[in-house]
Image (cartoon, helix red, strand yellow):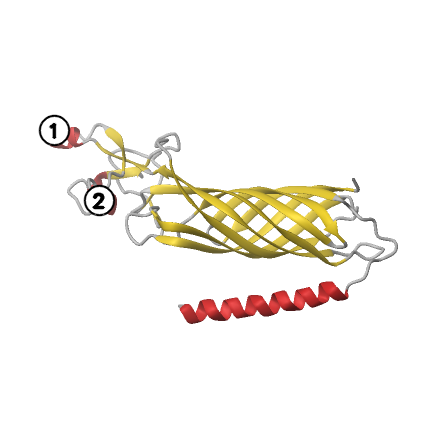
Amino acid sequence: MLKKYAISLLFCCLFLGGLEELYAQSTLNPDSVIYRKSWNAGMRLRSNGFGFGAEFTRSQRFKKSLLFQVQFSYFVDPKQTRQQSPYGSGGIFGDGYKPYIFGKRNSLFTLYGGVGQKFLLAEKGKRHGVQIFFKYAAGFSLAILKPYYLKVVDTTSIQNNTFSQTVDIGYVEGGNNELFLGNSRYGNIIVGASGFRKGWKLSALPGLHTEIGMEFDFGKNDQIIKALEIGVAADFYYKKVPVMIQDNTFLYPSVYVGFMLGQRKER
């Protein structure tokens, strides 16, 4: 594991060194307009979820800008397995019940704000073309945990052999592990997942976020941003984030691709 991280770090250092040399050799096109500010907003698809965000830049000097970011994301743990209960899909409780995720205890959302830099590597040609940027940023990440609820058969109705009622149950530390892991007497009477309106007793966990990426702006008008971005990112927390009942982690690396729309301003 450490060997893989060392190789990745070495590759990033070599990549950054090459970009710095390319940036140092670049010259200003006399026909170029220097834009002092810009903003954009868009959506990202990540290898472990999706999110929305916005960026703001302020020019520092030739082809170099100060970058501000804010993002809101939903994470999907790779260990999540969505399944349909036989009791809630044409079973004794009928249809209409949502599939549930086995062993899940919380839904994970993140709110991130960070600062970085953005470099213009290649300008557009006189006709069409693509502007290419390199950017990196780091900042604080807030993990927001929303309890995950299951819709299960009411134990009273089971004891009375009526099977007539369902209740919404959230995970209780050390109290109902067996139910959420499907090992108890009532574990196989899960009929589905509860609606999003259930479980609004939120908790939070602070952490750090870092990312590095490339941006390709193919907009025909220099003042209008229409860009595709690709990159890698990672979120770190001081302890394991309790998304699942078992096998949680404090590190969330991801690969992302995004699309952004925005505007540049000369002043």
Which residue type carries mark 1?
A: Asn
Specify whether 116 is left or right of 245.
right
Q: Write the residue at 22% across / 46% down.
A: 182
Which residue is painted at 19% across and 47% down in the image? Answer: 183
Check disc 1 and report the residue beneath it: 160
* Crowding near the residue tagged with mark 2, few <14, some 14–19, many ≥20 C-alpha atoms within 10 Å: some
Quarter of the image where the C terminus is located: top right
Q: Position of residue 265 (x, y in %)?
A: 77, 41
Question: How would you rate the neighbour count of disc 1 (Cα within 10 Å): few for under 14, some for 14-19, many for 20 or more?
Answer: few
Report the residue marked by disc 2: 177
Q: Residue furthest right?
A: 30
* Residue 149 at x, y percent in the picture: 31, 36
Task: Looking at the picture, tell me which residue is in the foreground, 89 or 28.
Answer: 28
Residue 146 vertical position relative to residue 23 in the rendered view, above or below: above
Between 175 and 85, the one nearer to me in the picture: 175
Instruction: Please state the horizontal and vertical placement of residue 6, each as a whole percent of the image.
Output: 47, 69
Residue drawn at 36 percent across, 54 percent down: 249
Tag 2: amino acid: Asn
Residue 30: quadrant of the picture:
bottom right
Circles 1 and 2: CB atoms closer than 8 Å: no
Q: Is residue 90 above or below residue 114?
A: above
Q: Is residue 84 above or below residue 217?
A: above
Residue 144's tag is none
- The part of the image, by quadrant, that contains residue 169 is top left
140 left or right of 198 in image: right
- In the rendered image, which quarter contains the N terminus? bottom left
Looking at the rendering, which quadrant does residue 123 occupy?
A: bottom right
**Which secondary structure, mark 2?**
helix
Which residue is rendered at x = 37% and y = 32% of the image? 195
Outermost residue on the front side: it is 60
